[in-house]
Image (cartoon, rainbow, N blue to C red):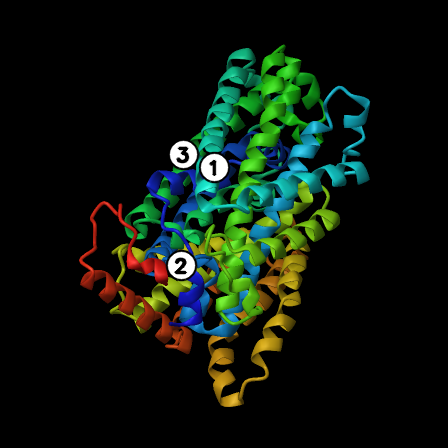
Amino acid sequence: MSTEQGSHSNYRRTLGTTALTAVGLGSIIGSGWLFGAERAAVLAGPAAIFAWVIGAVVALTIALTYTELGSMFPKAGGMVRYGQYSHGSLAGYMAAWANWIAIVSVIPGEATASIQYMSSWKFDWAGKLFDGKELTGTGLAAASVLVVFYFFLNWFAITLFAKTNNAITVFKVVVPALTAGALIFAHFDTSNVGSAHGGFAPNGWSAVFSAVAVAGIVWAFNGFQSPLNMAAEARNPGKSLPKAVVGSILIALVIYIALQVAFLMAVPAADLSGGWNTLAYKSPLADLSITWGLNWLALLLYADAFISPSGTGMIYAATTSRMINGVQENGHLPKVFGKVDPKTGVPKPALLLNLVISFVFLAVFRGWGSIAEIVGVATVISYITGPVAVMSLRRIAPDMKRPVKLKAMPVIAPIAMIFGSLVMYWARWPLTGKVIFIMAIGLPIWAWYELRKPWAELKPHLKAGAWMVTYLLVMAFVSWAGGTEFGGKGYLAQGWDIVVVILIALVFYAWGVSSAWRNPTLVATEKELASAEAAEAAAGSGDPEGTSEPSMAKS
């Protein structure tokens, strides 16, 4: 039995479609709904509504590529594995690093959101938690307690996690829907979108596109990854994963649009005297509730400011620990982080590592907005491997079982690559450059494990991963040289910069697909999955409803 098989035999296949959808929806509806509507409106004005639609389309397109991959490889931490399967260690590690950075930083982000909302309570001590830009020392201590709580709920068993999360997700869906409805009925001023306040798109459409990347919208929809990262615990991943991923995105989109509309129409005209970009609420939805006499709603929002982010923080504490498992099994972390407790089915060493990293992020990025920006761009970088990997594997592993296989994938995949590249560009320079630099910080870890290998063994990994390294450097350069509306130097004329980014996406998509190879990780995984499928068939399982625990749990 392989090391991977040994570690993963302790996972429990107990999560069905409903539980996985709750995981996805619970990840999407976290702190984003508490702050996203205001932050998007500050950047884009009333046109922020379209930013949410664009964000959902981008997430859905990219998610479709990952549902095929997730159904092919129902393993823990799936999102950090796919690049390794298709392109070997260099591209696989960079994708995994970007994905892990994007996900693990959400945990302190959720804690920060809760404390930031608490700072507007009418108590002297509460006002000292947040100084208007970031958490104070006291606020940081309170957020640290919340982070520990998220991990505590994951420590004991996956079944406890599932039951707790299902209950929290119901609350997280009901409260935002109730908030949107209550604000719409309390005050619906359509003049807010009129010319007196700059019109529908006061800062131009470039601001709408930037809002997708940096207003927490990409961060919010990034929650679709969570069911994929917990694929090893899915009862019937081939059926449940696509339903959970697509369903959670669509449900969340309806909720977010309702909240955005409610926020736009509920802002008092006096607060818009300086324009949308002057809004600076501490607790946006709660502050508006108090303004219009909805004190009961404000109290509910203050309570939910703990429940919604805590639910998301709990989910991400779970999924990031599975991602660490995946990175370890890719060969880039010590073996201890691949261990799963046989009694509880929880990867406790990985959970502890992510707890420490969460504290580091909490200390460095103390405000929700600053974390949202970093998470958004890192998320997009991690996205680009999905479209390339899914078509690469169709080329180099055509006979692998694909429970989910879309006929339109040859069209969807390059479009997803274009969308991901555009969102990265929309994030604006110098933020794009900063996050790409953070990606480079992780390379010494890869080098420690890989550069000791013989050149003949290392060379194909470098050759197959060259497209991704070059892509990030080219995108950083284009962001720097691009349109001034996206923070660039203006060397690329408005409109032509978008054309250039699209062409870059297509060129690197083609390069990435053509550079994939049947690396040792893919070959070993093919054998492992084929062996598990044969064992399942021999045992006479194959329950169509997925109610029995398949032998794939040993993979």
Q: Is residue 31 visible?
A: no
Q: Quadrant of the N terminus?
A: bottom left
Residue 114 occupies quadrant: top right
**Callout 1: SS:** helix
Q: Where does residue 280 sit, x and y in percent of width and height?
A: 71, 29
Does 177 sit above or below residue 409?
A: above
Say what amino acid the circle numbered 1 marks: Asn
Name the spot of residue 9 as percent of width and height, x first.
Answer: 39, 60
Q: Give me the disc on residue 165.
A: 1
Numbered mark located on residue 254 in the image = none
- Lower sequence index among marks 1 and 3: 1
Label 2 secondary element: loop
Residues under labels 1 and 3: Cα distance?
17 Å
Q: What kind of element bears circle 3?
A: helix
Select label 3 or label 2 by which is in front: 2
| Mark toward the start of the polypeptide (1 vs 2) | 2
Look at the image and tell me in which quarter the C terminus lies: bottom left
Three-letter code, disc 2: Lys
Dot 3 surroundings within 10 Å: few (below 14), some, or many (20 or more)? some
Whether residue 207 is visible: yes
Q: Residue at x 42, y 61 (%)?
A: 8
Q: Earlier in the sequence, mark 3 or mark 2?
A: 2
Query: Are circles 1 and 2 on residues that touch, CB within 8 Å?
Result: no
Separation of residues labelled 3 and 2 (CA atoms) = 25 Å
Q: Which residue is mark 3?
A: 251
Tell me where residue 543 appears, x and y as whole percent. Answer: 21, 50
Q: State yes or no: discs 3 and 2 in contact (Cβ < 8 Å).
A: no
Q: Is residue 442 above or below residue 220?
A: below
Q: Is residue 179 left or right of residue 267?
A: left
Tell me which corner region of the image, top left, top right, bottom left or bottom right, holds residue 31: top right
The residue that label 2 is drawn on is 75
